[in-house]
Amino acid sequence: MEEWRFEPAHDFGLSAEQRRQSLRREVGLESAISCLLWRLITRFYLALAHRLEICGRENLPKRSPFVLVANHASHLDAIILGGILPLRFVGAVFPIAAGDTFFTKRSSSIFATACMNALPIWRKNCGAHSLRDLRERLLNGACVYILFPEGTRSRSGEMGNFKPGLGRLVAQTNIPVVPCYLRGTFDALPPSGRIPRWKKIRVNIGQPVSFPSAANDRIGWEAIARSTETAVRALTN
């Protein structure tokens, strides 16, 4: 029989504020419950206000880890991608959010962690160690990332080019990357808007891809970004 060993939580000893901003933050019972309630509320809202249509749900992996990637035009995007996942993944879903947008104020950081379970990436100071921490968590933990490789919301509604950060997470691994295309979120809540409009939204989910043979270097990361971008653009019809 294997000897039992006690291992403290990765965020043990951090203050509440430090825990919210840590990429090693673990999900407790209270956070899991709040995320579940938020998920149920937003599912009802998306069905009622935006008549959310989901195409290709069968392409979602049955088990974690995996990464959902999509075009990005609205603050609704992460809410929608979290909402399309089965409830069994609640507590294991981590949207990768802009730290300079959601984690600079106490109120927004509490919302981002308590409801969305988001992990922060600081766009102006995203060191290699941050992506290494995210990669390690993806490889070692049963988690799901929601990632927008454009890096920011589109100001025109048109999809931009994908950045290579995704490649640093999944190069030389069998972790599935699930391409998704969100249609209608820019009309419902563009970056210039504050209150969502009741516009129809549709999500197209493509077949998962993985990159076990991609080189874990700049060339490989950029190739993964281009391949994934192509897969998302193929879902626009």
Image (spheres, helix red, strand yellow):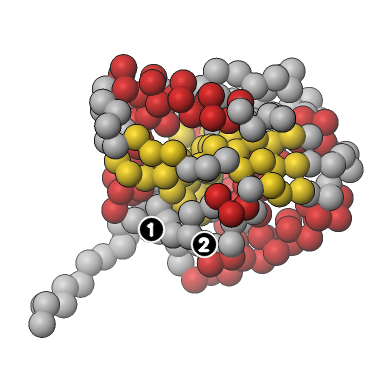
Q: Position of residue 214 (x, y in %)?
A: 30, 28
Up-down relation of residue 66 to residue 172 (above or below): below
Tag 1, which secondary structure?
loop
- Image quadrant holding the C terminus, namely top right
Percent from the top left, x then y, of residue 22? Answer: 40, 46
Q: Local crowd at mark 2 within 10 Å, few (<14), some, or many (≥20)? A: some
The answer, for residue 132, to whether it is visible in the render is no
Labels 2 & 1 near each other (Cβ < 8 A) = no
Which residue is pictured at 73% across the width and 58% down the height? Answer: 43
Q: Quadrant of residue 90?
A: bottom right
Image vertical order of residue 32 relative to residue 116, above or below: below
Residue 155 location (% of width, % of height): 71, 19
Which sits in the foreground, 231 or 222?
231
Left or right, 221 with reference to 57: left
Residue type, label 1: Ala
Q: Which residue is mark 1?
A: 142
Which three-letter amino acid code belongs to the residue tagged 2?
Phe
Q: Which quadrant would residue 236 be assigned to in this image?
A: top right
Q: Is residue 167 above or below residue 37?
A: above
- Which residue was labeled with disc 2? 89
Residue 38 lies left or right of residue 230; in this view the side is right
Q: Is residue 187 left or right of residue 149?
A: right
> Which residue sits furthest right?
198
Q: Which tag, 2 or 1, sits closer to the chain's start? A: 2
Seen at 49% across and 71% down, the residue is: 29
Residue 176 showing in the rendered view: yes
What residue is drawn where x is 42% and y is 56%? 64
Name the quarter where the N terminus is drawn.
Answer: bottom left
C-alpha separation, residue under disc 2 versus residue under disc 1: 9 Å
Residue visible at 44% across and 59% down in the picture: 63
Circle 2: element type? helix
Disc number for residue 59: none
